[in-house]
Image: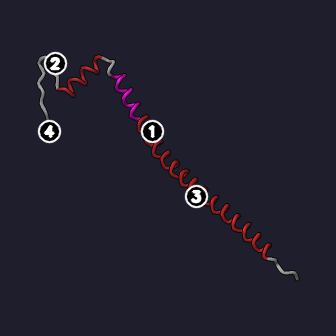
Amino acid sequence: MSKISKKDKRRFLFWSLLILIIVSYLGVFTYNYWSKILANYQEREILEKDYENLLSTEKKLSSEATKLLDPEYVAKFAREKYMYTKDGEKIIRIPE
């Protein structure tokens, strides 16, 4: 059996440390990358919910805008909301 020289031991140690440093760097890089991906995924879910809420609000508002083009609806809306009356009508408020 041959003995391992000091030069071979140093070379082995050097390459082992180099590989360890590279693997550690890649591990840290991968961890940071995946944490950013997870944060983006969670933010995307929140934004999709907000988008759905905004779409439903838009539908309601466009429906209301379409209804406000009808003069009869506008008159009814003004009487209910702002308590306008026709001639001869009286307003009676009933508490809820």
The percent position of residue 88, horizontal first and vertical second, equals 11, 18
Rounded to the nearest angstrom, the CA distance separating label 2 from label 1 is 41 Å
SS type, badge 2? loop
Q: Amino acid at mark 1?
A: Glu
For the N terminus, the quadrant is: bottom right
Q: Are marks 3 and 4 in contact (CB under 8 Å)?
A: no
Q: Are marks 2 and 1 in contact (CB under 8 Å)?
A: no
Q: Which residue range is magenta in the image? A: 56-67
Q: Disc 1 or disc 4, which is closer to the eye?
A: 1
Reading the image, the residue beneath label 2 is 86
Q: Amino acid at mark 2?
A: Lys
Label for residue 76? none
The percent position of residue 41, horizontal first and vertical second, equals 52, 48
Reading the image, the residue beneath label 4 is 95
SS type, badge 3? helix
Q: Amino acid at mark 4?
A: Pro
Q: Are marks 1 and 3 in contact (CB under 8 Å)?
A: no
Rounded to the nearest angstrom, the CA distance separating label 2 from label 4 is 22 Å
Mark toward the start of the polypeptide (2 vs 4): 2
Mark toward the start of the polypeptide (3 vs 4): 3
Considering only vertical position in the picture, is 46 above or below 61?
A: below
Reading the image, the residue beneath label 3 is 31
Mark toward the start of the polypeptide (2 vs 1): 1
